[in-house]
Amino acid sequence: MSNLFLKVVSVIATIAFGIVVAACSVSPLSADEKPKESEASTASLTTEQRLEQGRKIYTQKCASCHGEKGQGADGEYDEPLVGDDSIGELTRRITGTMPEGEPDECVGEDAHSVAAFIHQEFYSEAARIRNRPPRVKLTHLTGNQLRQSLADLYAHFSGSMWLEPKHGINGVYFDGARWKKENIKIERVDPVIEFDWKSDGPGEGIKPEDFFVQWRGGLKVNETGSYEIVLRSSCAFICKLGNFNREFINNRVQSGDKTEFRKSIVLTAGRVYPIHIELYQRKRKTGQRPANMSLSWIPPQGIEDVIPERNLLANSPPATFSLQTILPPDDRSYGYERGLSVDRQWDDSTTAAALEFAEITISELWPAYQRKHKKDPDENRAKLRIFLSEFAMVAFRSPLDDETRKFYVDGQVDLAEDDAEAIRRCLLVVLKSPRFLYPSLDQDQSPSQRAATRLALTLYDSLPADEWLLKLVRENKLETPDQTRAAAERMLRDYRVRGKTRELMYEWLNLTHLTEITKDEELYPEFDAALVSDLKASLDAFLDEIIWGESSDFRQLFLADWTFTTSRLEQFYGENWKPEKGEDSSLVKSVSAPDRRLGLLSHPYLMSKLAYRDSTSPIHRGVFLIRYLLGRTLRPPMEAFIPLSPDLHPDMTTRERVTLQTSPQNCQVCHIKINGLGFALENFDAVGRFREKEGEKPINPLGSYTQLNSESATFQGATELAKFLSNSHDTHRAFVNRAFQHFVKQPVAAYGPDRLDDLTQTFRDHNFHIRRLLVEIAVIAATPQVSTPDEVQP
Amino acid sequence: MTDYTSRRDFLRKAGISAMGVNLAMGLPSLVRAASKGENPRKQRLIFVFSPNGVIPKHFWPEVSEEKFELTRILQPLEEFKSQTLTMHGVCNKIKGDGDGHMRGIGCLLTGIELFPGDIQGGSDTPAGWSQGISVDQHLKNRLQANPQTQTRFGSLEFGVMVPERADTWTRMSYAGANQPVAPIDNPYQMFDKLYGQAKNRKMLASVLDGLSDDFRRLEKMISAEDRRILQDNIAMVGELEKDLKVELAASEKQSDVGHAVPTLPPNVREVNDNMPQITRMQSDLLVNSFAADFARVATFQITNSVGQPKMKWLGIEEGHHTLSHEPDKNEEAYEKLIKINTWYCEQVAYLAKRLAATPEPGGNGSLLDNTTIVWTNELGKGNSHTRNNIPFVLVGGGLGWKTGRALDFKNVPHNRLLMSFCEAMGQPAESYGNPDFCTDGVLTGLV
C-alpha cells in the first residue's frame, strides 16, 4: 500500500514539477511558422478569411474561459494558451476536446480556423516574440555568479589556474620525522593517498618508526557544494587546503586511538584548491604504532570514497578562495537561474559574503600584498589605498573615477585607523555596491571593458580578473567580433568553463536536482549507493571525454558505443562494461558495444533515474525526451494518476499497461507524443540493464515522434532513436537554446528573433562542435546589440 | 526570607563556623537556602596561566592565617592583599605519558592522564592530548545547563602570544577527552567574537546612505524598465536602514546599562615586543566581557608551557624557558626569573585592578568581589620540573573563600582543589579527573 502511495506521489511530483518549468520556458519553434498551405488545402478559405472566421468562433466559444488574448481567465482556465503544437495538432485537439464537455460544437473547418487564429495571434512562439519582444534584462549577480566572482577577486591577487595535465599528488618521503633535504628517499606522484604501511614503512632506506611524508598538489572540484573531507591516519598529520598556509585539519599530536578526522567545506565548481598534507611518524619510546594514511571525501550527494586520481593534480596551484556563506536560491521561473529577486534574504547574504571575504583579505591577501610591496612608499597609508583601489577596480569591472574612489576607498580608509577595520569597511561597500552586484550597469564603460565583462560573466559566471584579459581591456583590443572570439577561445581552455559546462549538461539532462536513485532491494540487491556513485562518475567522464575531446561532436553524445566503466560496473552490467584495455579497477574507457549501447540514452544513470523502484517508466522517459532533449512544451496532465499496478495486470507488459491507462482521448492529447518516445527505451529495465524480454514476453521497442515541422518519425528501439535524436533539428535547437540560456542567463530571442535559428544553423555548419558553440554564444553575449534594449531610452 | 549576598554572607549570618562548613554544605536544605535568593550572586572564575615554574623562595609567603607578608614576586598584589589567598602544598600528582611540561599544563585543569601519543618531550615517554575535560569547560557546561546561570558564551578562552602550533604544550583547556580548546590570542579576533556582529551591523548602517547615493547616480544610466529592479533595491536598502536604526538604538540603550564596547588601539601586531600591550588589551576585553555577562568562566593563557617570550622591556634578552633551566646558583638568571615572575604578577594585579574598578552590574560591590582569579603554572619550579607545590595564587571573592591568608596544604593532590572549585561554584562533584586522587574529598579550611 505504502509503496503504491509513494509511486503516486512521485508521478505527480515529477510531472507537476516538470510542467512548471516547461510552461514558463520559451518553447522552440521555427520563428515564423504560418498556417501551412497543405493544412488549408481542403478549404476554399484564404488565410485572411480563415483567421477572421477563427477570431469570431474563438470570441464566441473560447474567450470566456481562455481570455480574449489567450491569457486565461480566473476560475475557468488559468493557464495561458501557449505552446509548440502545429496548427494540425491544435485542430485535432480542439476537434477532440473543445469546448470542454461539448467537443462536438467545434469540429472540422471550424476547429481548423480557431487553431489557425490562436496560433497566429498568441499561441506560437513567433506570436509571443512578436507580441512581447524579449529584452536583455538588468539582473544582479546570481548566487553562483557571486561565489565565482569572489573566487576570481581572490585569484586576481593570488594568481590564476592553468589546465594541468598531470594527475595525482606529489609525494616526498623522508627518512626521519622532519624535512631534511638530504634525507629524501622517494619523490614520486602518488595517484591517490591510500596507504597502509603497517610496521614496514613506506620504502627502502626509510626507518619505519621514524619518517616524514609531504604531499602537495591541487584538488580539482567539478561541482559546487558541501564536501566532507575525511582523513584517516594512525600518525600525526597536518592538512592545509585552499592555500598552502591555510590550516584545514590539524592533527599535529597523535593522541590515543583517535584516527579519523572529518571536516566539511563548501567548494566551488571549476576551481582547483591547493592541498598539502604532512605526515609524521615519530619515534617513540613506548610501543611503536603501524603507519597508515588515507584521504577521502564525500562529495555533494555522493558517498565516501578515496579522492580519485582524476580530482588530484600533481602541481602547486595558486591559493584559492571558496565562499562558505549560504546563499539563497535564485529565481528559476524562466527555467534557468536569474538574478531578479530583490529581497532582504538576498541582501543579508551579500552582506555576509562581503564580510567573509573581508576576513580572508585581512588574513591572506593584504599581508601577501604588503610583503610583495615592501619597498613602496606608504605615506598616508598609500599602500593600503592602492591595494583597495585595485580591488575595487576589479570588482567594479571598471577604472575608478574620482568620486567613486573617494566614497569607496579613501572615505572608508579615513574612517578607520586600524588597517583591518579599513579593509572591512571598504570591502563591505564595494561588494554591496550596484557597481559590483549589477554587472551590466556599464553603459559608460569602454567597448572592450563591456566585452570582457560579458565574456567573463558568460563563460565563467564571474568577472574579468586574469591579467591577460585585463590587459586587452586596457589596450582596447576587444572591439571586434574576431577579437572577442579569439579571447573567448582562449578563455575556453579553463576549468571554470568546464565547471559551467558540466552544469549545463546536468540542466540539459535534468539531473541538477537529482538527490538519489534507489531500487527495490530484493529485485536488485547489488544496486547500491556505491554503484550509483560509479554510474555518475561514468556519465561525468563520458560527457567530459566527448565535450573536451578532439571533435567535441554533439552527435557523439547519442552515438558513442563506448562508455566509462569500473570493476563494480562491469560486475553488475556484464561484459559490455569490460575495460577497453586490460584489467583496471579505476574509472576507464569501456569496450565498444554497438548493438547494446548508444551514448547517453542507454546510460544506466539516466535510465535508472527515469524508472520506478521495480519497473520501468516509459512515461518518465518520454516526458524527459520530449521536454529536455527535444525541447518541446507539454501541458500538465488533467489530473494526477496512479500508475496501474503490474500486480493487477500480471499478463500485460509495461508497454501494454501504459497504453491502456493513457488511452482516453484527453490523455492522448499529450501521451501520443510521450508514449511513443518512452516505449523506444523499453529494452532498458529499471536499473538500465539491457533486456530482450519482460517476464515471458518479448519487448516491443517500436517508437514514434512528430517533429516541430509536423513530420513524423518511427524508430525500432534505442539504437534508431539515438540516431534519430543525433540528427534531429529539434534536438539541436533545444540544446542550443538550453546552452544559450545557461551561459548567458537571458532569453536568446532578446538577441534577435532569428538568433536561435541562426545559431542552430552555425552549430550544424561546424559539425556540431560543442566548444565552438560555446564560443559563439559568448561572442553573441559580448557583442553590442544594434539598438540594445538596455541603452538609455530618450 | 533573608537575602544573602554571598555564600560567605549566608554562612556568617547562619552562624556556621569555618570548621562546620563542609558538613553544613552537604545538607541539601541549607544548600538550597543559599542558592535560592531572588538575585543569586553571579560567581565568576578566571584561570590565569604563566609558564615555566617560579622561584619559590621569592614567590611563596610565609604561612599565615591572619596577616601575611607579600614576597618580592607577589609585591604587585599589595593593593589586593586582603583579597589574596596563596595555596602552597598543592601538587599535580598525575603520572603516565608525557614529559613534565606536558603533564604540567595538560593535567593542570583536567586532573587526569594524557593519552599515549607521539609527542616526545625532552624526557619521559611520548604522549597525546588529555584524557578528560578541564575544570573551566566542565563548569561552563554546568552553568550553561541552568537558565539562571546561562550566558552568551559560557566561557571564554583568552591567550597571549600562544604559538601557532596545536600541541600538548600549547593547550590548557579541554572540552573533553582528545578535544583541546585553542585559546584566542589575537585581541582583534577576540573582539570580533565578542562584538563583531554588533560592530558589523553598525558599520553596515553607516555606509547605506552612501550606497543609496551611488545607486541613484547609476540609475540615470538605464532604461525605465531596468530602473525598476534598482529602485526595488534602493527601497529595500531604505527599509534596512530604518530597521538598523531601531536595532542599534535598542542595543545602545542596553549597553548604557551594562557596559560600553571597548576600543582597541589599532594595528597591534602579534610580535614578541608587543606582548605587554596585547596582554593589556586581552585583560580589558576580559573585564568588559564579564561586565556584559558574556561568560562566567575564563581562561587566560599567557604564552604556553615551555613559553619562550623575550622580555626585552625588562632588559631581558633570553627566552623565558631557556632561563628557567639555569641552576639557582646562576645569580643573573635567578634575578631575571624573579623579574619575569613579577611581571606576570603585575598582569594579574592589573586584571584585579580593572575588576575592582568595575561595579558589579545590578549587584553590590565590584566585579572583583564576585570573581576569583586563579593564577597558576604548569611547574612548581623551572629547573627541577617539579609539579609539587604548583603555584596557586587566588585573588578576589568569586569562590567565597576566606582571603588575606597564606596557606600550606602540605602535599595534597591538586584534584582536590579542582573539586573545591566545582563545589564553590555551586557544582559539587564526587571527584574530578582521576578519582584515585580524590578520595579525601574537597580541601578543607578554605572558607
Image: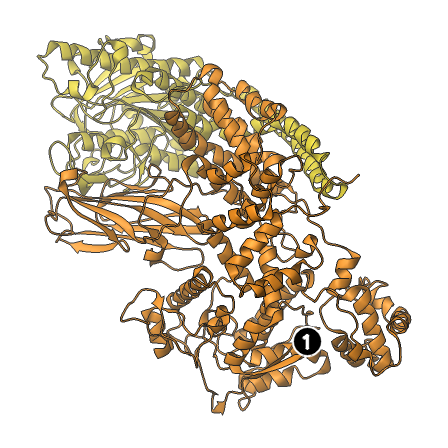
| Residue ID at (47%, 33%) | B148
Q: Of A548 and A17, which appears nearest the observer?
A: A548
Residue B97 x/y as whole percent:
15, 39
Q: Is residue A105 left or right of residue A38?
A: right
| Quarter of the image where the C terminus of chain B is located | top left
Q: Of B302 and A188, which appears nearest the observer?
A: A188
- The colour chain B appears in is yellow
Amino acid under disc 1 = Cys
Q: Quadrant of residue B337?
A: top left
| Res. B65 visible in picture | no
Q: Is residue A353 left or right of residue A265?
A: right
**Which element type, helix, strand or loop, lies under badge 1?**
helix
| Residue ID at (63%, 67%) | A631
| Residue ID at (75%, 68%) | A33
Residue B163 x/y as whole percent:
28, 28
The residue tagged 1 is A670
Q: Quadrant of residue B89?
A: top left
The chain coloured orange is A
Residue A224 x/y as whole percent:
47, 51
Category of crowding for the residue at label 1, using alpha-carbon neighbours closer than 10 angstroms: few (below 14), some (14–19), many (at least 20): some
Residue A330 x/y as whole percent:
60, 50
Q: Chain of mark 1?
A: A
